[in-house]
Each structure stands twice: as C-alpha cells, then as structure tokens.
Image (tube, rainbow, N blue to C red):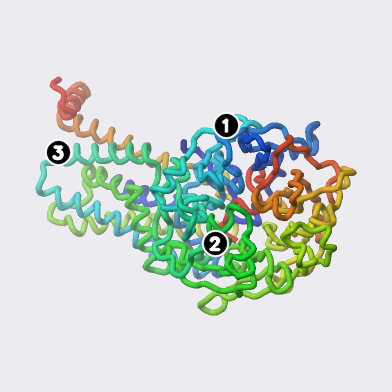
Amino acid sequence: MWGWAALAGLGAFHGVNPAMGWLFAVARGLQSGERAAVLRALGPIALGHAVSVALVVALVIALRGEIDPITMQVAAALGLIGFGALRLVRGARHRFRVGMVAGFRDLALWSFLMATAHGAGLMLAPVLLAAPLYAPGWAVWGGLLAVGAHSVAMLAVMALIALIVFDRVGLAILRRGWINLDLLWSGALIGVGALLLLFVAGAHVGTPNGALAALLRLCGGHA
Amino acid sequence: MATWKPDPTFYPSPRLAMQAPAERLAYVAMLNVEAQPKPDAMGVVDLDPSSATYGKVLGRVDMPGVGDELHHFGWNACSSALCPYAPHPHIERRYLLVPGLRSSRMYVLDVKPDPRKPQIVRTIEPEEIASRTGYSRPHTLHCGPEGIYVSALGAPNGDGPGGIFLMDHESFDVLGRWEMDRGPQFLAYDLWWHLGYDTMVTSEWGTPNMIESGIVPELLLGGKYGHHIHFWDLKRRRHTQAIDLGAEQQMVLELRPAHDPTKAYGFVGVVVSLKDLSASIWTWHRDGDAWAIRKTIEIPAEPADPDQLPPLLKGFKAVPPLVTDIALSLDDRFLYVSCWGTGEMRQYDVSDPFNPRLVGSVRLGGIVAQAKHPASDLPLNGGPQMVEVSRDGKRVYFTNSLYRAWDEQFYPEGVRGWMAKLDVKPEGGFTVDKKFFPEFDAGFRPHQVRLEGGDASSDSYCYP
C-alpha cells in the first residue's frame, strides 16, 4: 500500500510546483479572461507529464526481467544521485520553443519537456523497484496503474491550486509562496538515491554492518 | 546562486508592480566628453527624499577604458522570470549589463554588495560579441523569459544588418544571434515584445556608419534612416511583418508596448518628419491576423530665428521637436514624450491609445528656449531626453544628452549635463521637483536612468 501512496504523493508534489503546470493553466485563463481556459489547459499538461513519467516506468519494467534486482537498484540509485547533482550544478534549463500562445499540442509538449528536464519520473523508479505493487505477470497493468495513480494525483492537486489561485487568491502569492521547489527536488533525488543504496545493501546482507559492507563493495571498495 | 524565494523585486503583473516601494537610488550612465579622453562612468543618484544627500550624485564607477559611449543598459533578470513557460524565479536582480555603444564592450556591474557602489565584475569584449553573433554596437537590452535580449546596430565593420543577440542571464555568456529568419529587416534600434502574443517588435535607426560621425544630412534628406517597424514570431525567431511608416518619417526609435500582456497595442516615437520637421507618436495594434499602425500624436516644429539655430537647422528657420525617447507608466495610462529639440517634456493620457490627450507639459532647456530649471538661474541646454517612470507611476526622471556626435550638431556649444524629476498628480499633470537638480561632475553627460528594483521600462510581465 505504501507504494501506491508514494506514487500518488509524488504526483501531488509535482502538482504543487508552479513550474510543472498549474501556473501555465492560470496564465492561459488570465490571458483569455475565461475560467474555462484554465480547465482546458490542465488536460494537455497532465498528459505531457504522464507520458514523461510513463517512459521511466516502462524502462524500469522492461529492464526488470533482464537485469538482476541488485544491479537494477544500484543503477537506479546512481541515476538519481547523478541527475540530482547535475541539476544542482547546471541549474534548471528553461529554453523551450513554447510561448504564451499555447494550444493543446504546445502545452502537452511543454509539460513533457518540463517533466523530463525535472526528472519527474526518475523518482518513481525506486518505488517500483522497492514496493510490491503488482503480482508477477501483471507488469504492464501494474505499470499503467502506477502512471495513472501518479498522474491523477498530479492533475487533482494542479487543478485545485490553479482554480483557487484563479478564483480567489491571485498571483501575488507567487512573490512569497513560490519557494525553490527545484532545489528541494534535486536534494530529494540525491537523498532517495542514497537511501536506495542503503536499502539495497541492507536487504542484501540483512544487518546494518553487513549493509555498510555491501554498500562499500557496491561502490567499488573491497571491505 | 539560486535563492530560496523569488527576488522581491519580481512582480507577476504590472498592476502588482505598481505597489512596489519607492526607489531610493538611480543608476545613470554618464558619458565623458572632456577633450583629454577619460573613461565614461556609472553614476549613482540619491532618490530618497528623507536623505540628507537627496538629489545628489553619491558617486560614480569609472569604466576601465576610454571611449565606450555608455548609453542604454539593463538588469540581468526581472519580472519576466515568473513567466509560466520558462520559470526561473530564484535568481537575483543583481547585475547591470552596461554596453558601450561605440566600443561594443559590455560591462557587468554587481550592485548587491553595496548598491551605492556598483562593482565591475566582468567585461565582455567586442571580439566575443562579434565572433559569436556577427554583431557590434550593442544598444538596448531587455531581460526576457529565456535570457537577455540585446539589440545591436550593425556588423563589426559598421555596416548592416543590425539585429538581436541573446545572452545567458546567469553566466552572461554571449549565446548567439537571435534571428532565424530576418526577412527584409536591415536596420536596428530598439526591441521589445508582447509576451502574451509571442510577438517581438523592433525599430530602426541607422547602421553604425550612418550615425557615428554625426547625422548625415544627405542620408536624412534622402529618407535613408529607418522608417519601418518590424514584427516577429518571438518563439520561432522569424520575421512576420514589416510596416513602412513612409520614407519621410525618419528614425523610428523607442518602442513602448502596453505592459498588460493581454493588450495588443503599443507606442513608437518618430524623431522627425521630412515634410515639416514635426515629430510623431504612432500606435500599433492588432488588426485581425496582422499588425497595423497609425499616427496618433503629431508635435509641430516651432518657428525660430536662424541666428539662434545651429548650422544644421538654419535653413529650415524652425526648431524640430525631435522626439527621442518616450516612456509608458505601468498602468498603461500615461505616456511621457521627450522633445529634445524644443526642450519640452509632455505627458499624454493614453487610456484610449488611439486618442491621446495632452495633460501635462514643462519646458526645460531646448535649442532656442534654453528654459531654466526652478532650482537654478542658469539657462539650460540639451533637452528632456532619456525618460524613466517609477513603478508606482508617481515620479518621472529624465536627463538631457542624446549621443555624443549628434549632441554637437544640435547643441554646438556642448551639452551641459543635467537631470530633472517630476512629481505626477494622480489624474494627470505634474510639477517639477525644485529640490531635485543633481550636479554632475565636470565633463560628464547623463544618459539612461535605471531605478533601484526596476522601473517602467526594465521589466516585462506574463500576467495582467
């Protein structure tokens, strides 16, 4: 159960982030002066996000049968740490060929690029690898459900915030409320990567000391 | 370095930006014109009325070299960082990018450690700009959603085409030429945009060779200076439309699109008409699927005794208004128009952008009038030129020099630098602040003014 909660929780976190879409939906509404435009923008944004996440999920499921679990988990952990570190060093890129005049296709493409650059789907990998989400033989359905749980949560939170901001609060909230979620996210990627490494080591060896030894071994040492 | 919260000077909309606190400092580009060449400088002026040094130049930062011709400049980042499609709000408005219009060198000044004493932290050499973009003579810059956009008047050899190049707003690397397809555009001057419509607008002055040794009468009378306005697809970087204002409309300069991104209109000033030496303001607007423009203000030339006119103008027996800069308040309500020739600052109510109403005027300087400032008994020369409006719209600042080689043609005795301030009344009209008349160090002429935290031409907004 915790696996599903984690998938949905990550979706909710992405939904909160103004840079992941709700702000764009509000902007569409303000530019055209109609509330319906806010709602219309949410679908393509959620779709683009879901496709980006689905790519990671599909990759994990596909490789799972081919590669042994430990290698898989270590690779995922190192991927998370590396991507998080890269984001910290390079900062967020924000040069996309999409502007304020954005229709369905532009919004979906933008959201896909934004989520991919953010590494939105990467965080799902450890959940998929560590949590018993589905029975063997049900991988495709399990994967779809995983993407669905994440995306529905993202869409729900995004829609809620977009409408509250559009209808009541106003954009002044951005000035104080827009904390640096990118920085948090990069930290989270690195933190979860590190936790996953510990988890692998712990599961492999079964004791804290053994875990440390295994971790060192995995990292190339000879403890 | 990324911050935890957005820079407090970023505002989602022009409406919210009008609630910003009053500015306490102005940065003023200062051109040195002494016979013995000395560096240009960035001056810092005290704008805090409660300060003992109110209205004084607090100090200046000299550039490392001579002959830069500091002119326009701008911030590394502004409110456009909050735009939804390219968000990067956790960056600081901290650096002033200061191009030398003649040297093509660009300085990066850090105002954070001590806002009263900016420090030069980086110099971008003309060779770097030339090799990465093919451009030279950087002129106007705007902080956009994806980086810093800089207009450039021409190529390193002084010919055209002029255009736009992009810079990174964190590393200040020169990224390259902006245009993918420039269409018929050749001359360059100003750039700005309608972010809500993904549309860039550019205007025309002349190539470096057409301006650097002064205005060329043959080119002017032949209608060779810029008379077009250009519209571009901001995202695809393609030219979409040129509108010819007519060859008699010489020098289409400052662009002031409505700050509200949902409004698709703006104002551009034309320096002089060959027909009658008048100056004009035109209102461009969206018309179906294209852009259209029409003249909405015409300011006539004033008859004058040839003895009082410089050689360039004697034959015309009139002094042209020479509209060289305009500024639009953040509520898109008041347009300020500098008449550098006649020495007049005008205020128009442009609530209806097609029917501007003149609601305020003051005479300071001017080729013939040499009108005095209330704080001084000396006749002034030069005239209202670079004009800047505070974010709340209550204060207006302006300086009196244009461009060194051209200053000498219209004011052969040499422009003596001054700066003035207006206090604006809520429903239009204004008074000259008698306490604000900074004295500039000898040999310096002030040009563009930038206000602490942003002003009415430094920021663009993605939300109404």
Q: Which mark is residue B119?
A: 1
Q: Are marks 1 and 3 on the same chain?
A: no
Q: Is residue A56 above or below residue A88?
A: below
Instruction: Name which quarter of the figure residue A75 lies in.
Output: top left
Q: What residue type is labelled 1?
A: Gln
Instruction: Say which of marks 3 and 2 sits in front.
Output: 2
Q: Pointer 3: residues within 10 angstroms few (<14), some, or many (20+)? A: few
Which secondary structure lies at badge 1?
Answer: strand
Gap between marks 1 and 3, in whole Å?
Answer: 52 Å
| Residue at mark 2 | B193
Q: State the residue lying farthest toward the bottom.
A: B288
- Measure how far apart labels 1 and 2 are at the Cα level: 30 Å
Label 2 is placed on what type of residue?
Trp
Q: Residues within 10 Å of mark 1 (few under 14, many from 20)?
A: some
Left or right: B33 with respect to B196? right
Residue B443, numbered circle: none
Q: Is mark 2 on a helix, strand or loop?
A: strand
Per the image, the residue denoted by label 3 is: A71
Observer-nearest residue: B387 or A159?
B387
